[in-house]
Image (cartoon, helix red, strand yellow):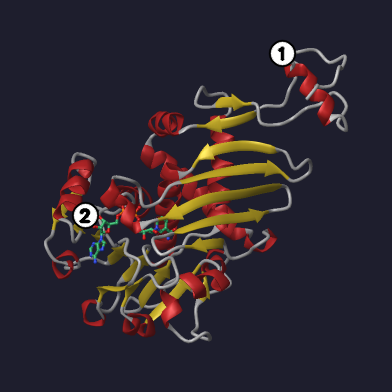
């Protein structure tokens, strides 16, 4: 094929719009540069700010493509000025193959032009935003003075969950349990020296002893019973992270009946969350209403509060906004040439001439 003979130069114009890209390596460096707990606290503020303006967002349950071994999802939202989406997978069998259960990347775009303004890795960022969301919710719902958490499931999310609770809720002590003792040893070693008392437990019953916050963060594509009804006493806050897919839950249904359940976006949570076990009209509170004062959070020290977290697109949007604002003026990104810029916008074909050998 003969390419067009155009008058265009062979190089792209110097004012070409480039898209900042944050690689995994740069994300790691940025986290160290900002400080993990400072970043978790900052992310929680961005997420809370977006929960306060929940009604201004386009909301849709995420688009999920299920297979026998996992799920691949797209999570879009927009506030009318910016548009964001995340690509994320969930493959519990991956760890046995030396791969991550969850990997992700995301993009932020300008609604006015439709042009991307940021592309970033989101595997680490998802762990941070999930932990920041958990802690932001626990700040509103956990019983006063809560300082001990049971962390059941000691995989990739677990240290982030613990440190966000420390930074945002004043957690002093964490009690770890995983069905795989190697995961517990890994989590304990990673948390050593970070200003939190760590206790390694050999059963979930031992882990919940004396804990006011119970976090479940296991990965198994089945209706599991990580917490049975008789394990949950009055006055605790449950932060249920791992049940986030149809057919994948962690809590006995009896716990849900005894709890006040708080969710992100009910149409998505009813499909994916713990409440998929309950009738369609099971009463839940949308958490953004607690943040805006339109609904009550914890009203009684003996009440069981339950955050049925599945992860919602607005939390990723907040994280993308945080990244856009915090990479400015740093060296923690590279510019990507991912926007075609023909000299005449209608002459895309002609632009090929720039690369003509
Ligand atoms: P991971 O595979 O790294 O860790 C999961 C851990 O759970 C493993 O160590 C495994 O041994 C343990 N486990 C499995 N079954 C168990 C059981 N019955 N009892 C005790 N431990 C058990 O996964 P991860 O990245 O830490 O993610 C954990 C879960 O959280 C996944 O299901 C993931 O989909 C979910 N997740 C939710 C959100 C959200 O926003 N709600 C965000 C990220 C991840």
Name the N-terminal-most of marks 1 and 2.
Answer: 2
Q: Residues within 10 Å of mark 1 (few under 14, many from 20)?
A: few
Q: Residue at x 44, y 67 (%)?
A: 245
| Depicted 50 relative to depicted 223: above or below | above
Residue 253 coordinates in the image, percent (x, y): 35, 82
Decide if residue 355 is on the left or right side of residue 26: right
Q: Residue at x 28, y 66 (%)?
A: 214
Residue 102 coordinates in the image, percent (x, y): 40, 51
Local SS, label 1: loop
Real-space Cα separation, disc 1 to disc 2, in angstroms:
64 Å
Q: Which residue is mark 1?
A: 357
Q: Residue at x 54, y 69 (%)?
A: 268
Q: Which residue is mark 2?
A: 173
Residue 127 coordinates in the image, percent (x, y): 40, 48
Q: Residue at x 19, y 57 (%)?
A: 176
Q: Is mark 2 within 8 Å of ligand 1?
A: no
Residue 244 coordinates in the image, percent (x, y): 43, 65
Specify the quadrant that holds the N terminus: top right
Decide if residue 58 is on the left or right side of residue 351: left
Decide if residue 11 is on the left or right side of residue 301: right
Residue 17, quarter of the rendered image: top right
User: Which label sits on residue 179?
Assistant: none
| Depicted 126 relative to depicted 148: above or below | above
Between 136 and 349, the one nearer to me in the picture: 349
For the residues bearing labels 1 and 2, Cβ distance under 8 angstroms: no
Whether residue 106 is visible, yes or no, is: yes
| Depicted 4 relative to depicted 264: above or below | above
């Amino acid at each position: 094929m003969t390419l067009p003979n155009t008058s265009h130069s062979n190089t792209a114009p110097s004012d070409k719009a480039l898209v900042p890209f944050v690689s995994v390596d740069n994300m790691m460096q940025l986290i160290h540069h900002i400080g993990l707990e400072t970043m978790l606290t900052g992310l929680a503020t961005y997420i809370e700010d977006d929960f306060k303006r929940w009604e201004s967002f386009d909301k849709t349950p995420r688009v999920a493509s299920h297979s026998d071994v996992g799920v691949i999802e797209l999570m879009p939202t927009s506030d009318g000025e910016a548009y964001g989406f995340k690509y994320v997978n969930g493959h519990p069998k991956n760890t046995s193959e030396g791969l991550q259960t969850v990997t992700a990347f995301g993009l932020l775009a300008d609604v006015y032009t439709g042009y991307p303004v940021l592309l970033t890795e989101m595997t680490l960022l998802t762990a941070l935003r999930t932990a920041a969301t958990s802690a932001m919710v626990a700040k509103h719902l956990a019983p006063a003075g809560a300082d001990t958490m049971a962390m059941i499931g000691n995989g990739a999310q677990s240290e982030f969950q613990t440190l966000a609770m420390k930074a945002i809720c004043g957690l002093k002590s964490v009690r770890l349990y995983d069905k795989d003792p190697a995961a517990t040893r890994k989590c304990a070693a990673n948390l050593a020296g970070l200003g939190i008392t760590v206790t390694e437990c050999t059963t979930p019953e031992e882990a919940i002893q004396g804990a006011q916050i119970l976090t479940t963060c296991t990965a198994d594509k089945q209706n599991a019973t990580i917490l049975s009804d008789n394990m949950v006493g009055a006055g605790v806050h449950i932060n249920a992270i791992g049940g986030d897919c149809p057919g994948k839950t962690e809590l006995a249904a009896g716990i849900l009946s005894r709890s006040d359940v708080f969710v992100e976006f009910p149409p998505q949570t009813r499909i994916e969350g713990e409440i998929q076990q309950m009738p369609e009209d099971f009463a839940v509170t949308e958490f953004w209403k607690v943040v805006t004062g339109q609904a009550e959070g914890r009203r009684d020290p003996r009440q069981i509060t339950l955050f049925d977290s599945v992860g919602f697109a607005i939390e990723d949007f907040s994280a993308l906004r945080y990244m856009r604002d915090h990479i400015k003026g740093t060296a923690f990104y590279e510019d990507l040439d991912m926007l075609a810029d023909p000299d005449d916008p209608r002459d895309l074909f002609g632009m090929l001439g720039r690369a003509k050998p």
